[in-house]
Amino acid sequence: MKPSEILEALPKWSNATAAELLASPAWSMPCRFGDEQCAMRLDAVHPGDAIDLAIRLEGDDHVLRIADSPSFPDLHALWAERASMPEAVLLALVEKECGPLLQLLENAVRRQLSVVGFAPSAPSADESMIYARVVGADGQDKASFALTATPAVTAVLGSLRFIDVAHPAVRDESLSVEREFAAFSFPAADASTIEVGDSVLLPEVGTVEPRFVVDGRFIVAGNTVSEWKDDGMYRAVAAELDSVTLGALFDIATGASSLAPSAPPAPGTQLRLVRLGKPVASGRLSQLGAQAALAVDVVGA
């Protein structure tokens, strides 16, 4: 599986609303600023000293606040004197200098952008705004701006494909890991008669490499990650859950690393016998003749 496929399989991310995705610090949208490949991030400082443009995105009126930036050299040089410039001259300069930003925004929201003029007033404090910065490949900011948010803009930008799987907010997420030592068929009639003191043979233990079931959704076998679905087999698993970060799972999926191999459980290790997510029995790993077995201490939960 690819990291993006793993992320999409997690309800926290796949069920997130567009607004929730936009609020994530991991949101990052690939874009072009002029001829340079950049990324748009929504963690810009609220611009205080800014130029407020009234723009229209295919019929929807917006306010676009543009902060001062060396990326707009002529406008940057005249920034302190802009209040004394004729409005028509300043507007023409803004449209010329900020053309790459306007084009970037048009491409990002997938709506034709037109400049109406200067906004008659700055956005009110309670008006919903998106605060963005454009980051170059060198990590330096190219421009910062704010745009009034509408449901249409939020819906376009709030996409799971813009969540950066390399961001710590994603990579540091912890997932449960269940170590599976054996999976086998077992007659239902026999399972219903298990009692404390019985031994359930586990011939796979010690002969088959343990597997890792992550979050009840993924199976890690060797250095591969694939989707896991409970097939109804009886499974002997470690009594205690481990954990793994989502970043570590991504690294396994891309071949950058692998989970440390799990050694066969030692005699006396606490195990659980489960089927379809429900406990059947629990106890200790023991030997019955030459074969590994589960010495049942508890039946059911």
Image (cartoon, rainbow, N blue to C red):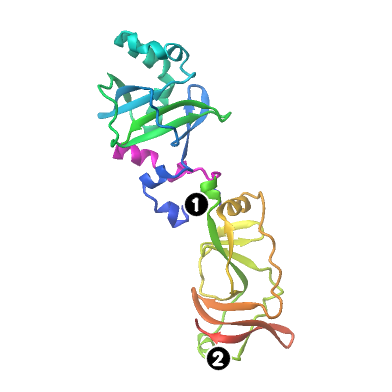
Identify which amino acid the numbered label 2 is placed on.
Answer: Glu
Near-viewer residue (180 or 98): 98
Q: Which residues are magenta?
A: 150-167
Residue 144 visible in image:
yes
- Of residues 47 and 174, the one nearer the viewer is 47
Vertical relation: 270 (above or below) 299: above
Mark 1 secondary-structure assignment: helix
Q: Quadrant of residue 76?
A: top left
Residue that numbered label 1 is attached to: 7
Asked if residue 81 lies left or right of residue 281, the reply is left
Left or right? Give the position of 64 relative to 168. left
Residue 11 sits inside the magenta stretch: no
Quarter assignment of residue 291: bottom right
Of residues 280 and 184, the one drawn nearer to the viewer in this rendering: 280
Determine whether 159 is above or below 45 in the image. below
Q: List x then y, in percent, for residue 207.
A: 71, 74
Number of numbered callouts drawn: 2
Q: Is residue 80 above or below residue 226?
A: above
Q: Is 153 included in the stretch rendered in magenta? A: yes
The picture places residue 285, in percent across and down from the top left corner, at 66, 81
Q: Position of residue 254 (x, y in %)?
A: 62, 49
| Residue that numbered label 2 is attached to | 195
Q: Going 37% across and 35% down the picture, which residue do you hit?
A: 130
| Mark 2 vs mark 1, CA separation in Å | 41 Å
Vertical side of 5 occupied by 85: above or below: above
x and y, in percent, of residue 142 in the image: 49, 25
